[in-house]
Amino acid sequence: MDAEARANHAKRLVEDEVLNEAFDTIRSTAIEVWAKTKADAHQEREIAWMTVKVIDRVRAELQSVIDSGKIAAARVQNPLR
């Protein structure tokens, strides 16, 4: 799959309501778990923190694919840049 096709696919995922709802629910649940656990519940708090970071990282990676596709499309349209 070329960069432009990957970007289009990533854009559909980023705009998908169900996927965003799932990410938001998982992220907010993890934040709630982190906030409600006792300070000595290290493993539970660490898992909650990692969950938030993974969701954020997936979203950032999808945005990176979109941005890369835009750059690739611009190069095709104007190869001298």
Image: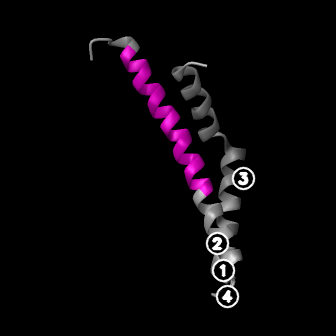
Q: CA distance from mark 4 to mark 2?
A: 12 Å
> Mark 4 or 3 closer to N-term?
3
Q: CA distance from mark 1 to mark 3?
A: 25 Å
Q: CA distance from mark 4 to mark 3?
A: 26 Å
- Vertical position of residue 71 compared to residue 47: above or below: above
Label 3, secondary structure: give it: helix
Which residue is labeled 1 in the image?
A: 42
Residue 46: assigned label: 2
Q: Which of label 1 and label 3 is nearer to you? A: 1
Q: Which of label 4 and label 3 is nearer to you? A: 4
Q: CA distance from mark 2 to mark 3?
A: 21 Å
Residue 51 at what x, y percent from top left? 65, 62
Question: CB atoms at circles 4 and 3 under 8 Å apart?
Answer: no
Mark 4 neighbour class, 10 Å CA radius: few under 14, some 14 to 19, many 20 or more: few
Q: Residue at x 59, y 47 (%)?
A: 58
Which residue is labeled 4 in the image?
A: 38
Going by the numbered disc 2, the residue's amino acid type is Glu
Residue 30 at what x, y percent from top left? 67, 68
Label 2, secondary structure: give it: helix
Going by the numbered disc 1, the residue's amino acid type is His
> Mark 4 or 2 closer to N-term?
4
Going by the numbered disc 4, the residue's amino acid type is Lys
Residue 22: assigned label: 3
Q: Residues in magenta?
A: 54-75
Mark 2 neighbour class, 10 Å CA radius: few under 14, some 14 to 19, many 20 or more: few
